[in-house]
Amino acid sequence: MLIKSKEISKKDYVLRAGQINREIHFIEKGLLWCYSKRDEQDVVSWFMKEGETIVSVLSFYDQVKSHENIQALEDCELHYISYEELEELYHDFPWFNYIGRVLTIKYLKMFVRQAEGLRGLSAEERYKYMMETQPEIVLRVPTKYMASHLGINEFTLSKIRGKKY
């Protein structure tokens, strides 16, 4: 069977910087984050939850060492397939390319919307945008990681959260 499953505990890593991302994961249960280090600070790329996939994009698709880490923020149940097995599926079942294309487009659009939605906004506006577009993520992610994702410090985020919207 190509699709395998595993459970990982909160704080466990799916990928560490310097490793090659050899598997793409579908999240059955739980929440993960993808981040890199810049000047000893965590720089958040993604938060992914149930029903989504998580992967270090450049590392997985180019099969090169990752500059990102993928870590569980909650206990997780994951299903996964290796890069080689996915490529085999694409080769043996051309219709599966369609599924891959649909997923790629979904995440590309999500990335562009997020980048456009956050670009040029104040800290408060970025928080409001996240609350409007991904409230379940905002409520589940620890403050320090959400602050990093929004490009603000924890104190500022706490002040913003204290206001009523």
Image (cartoon, rainbow, N blue to C red):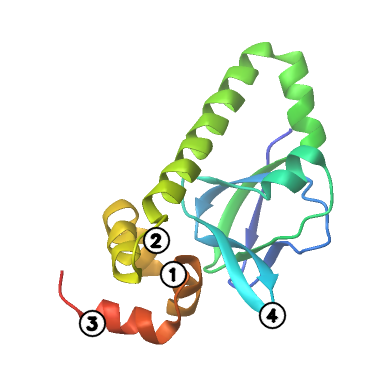
The residue nearer to you, when weighing 92 against 105, is 105
Q: Is residue 144 left or right of residue 133?
A: right
Residue 165 vertical placement versus 60 (above, below): below
Q: Secondary structure at mark 4?
A: loop
Packing grade of label 3 (10 A; few <14, some 14-19, many >=20) is: few
Q: What distance separates the C-alpha of mark 3 from that of mark 4?
A: 28 Å
Q: Which residue is mark 1?
A: 141
Q: Secondary structure at mark 2?
A: helix
Q: Is residue 5 left or right of residue 139?
A: right
Mark number for residue 40? 4
Task: Please identify the quarter of the rendering in which residue 38 is found.
Answer: bottom right
Q: Earlier in the sequence, mark 1 or mark 4?
A: 4
Q: Which residue is mark 3?
A: 162
User: Can the viewer see residue 23?
Assistant: no
Q: Where residue 19 appears, x then y in whole percent?
A: 83, 58
Q: Are marks 2 and 1 in contact (CB under 8 Å)?
A: yes
Mark 2 residue type: Ile
Q: What distance separates the C-alpha of mark 2 from that of mark 4?
A: 24 Å
- Front position among marks 1 and 4: 4
- Front position among marks 1 and 3: 3
Packing grade of label 2 (10 A; few <14, some 14-19, many >=20) is: some
Residue displayed at 78% across by 31% down: 85
Q: Which residue is mark 2?
A: 137
Mark 3 residue type: Gly
Q: What distance separates the C-alpha of mark 2 from that of mark 1?
A: 6 Å
Q: Where residue 88 appears, x then y in whole percent?
A: 79, 24
Q: Secondary structure at mark 1?
A: loop
Packing grade of label 1 (10 A; few <14, some 14-19, many >=20) is: some
Mark 4 residue type: Glu
Mark 1 residue type: Val
Q: Where residue 64 appears, x then y in whole percent?
A: 84, 47
Q: Is residue 131 left or right of residue 60?
A: left
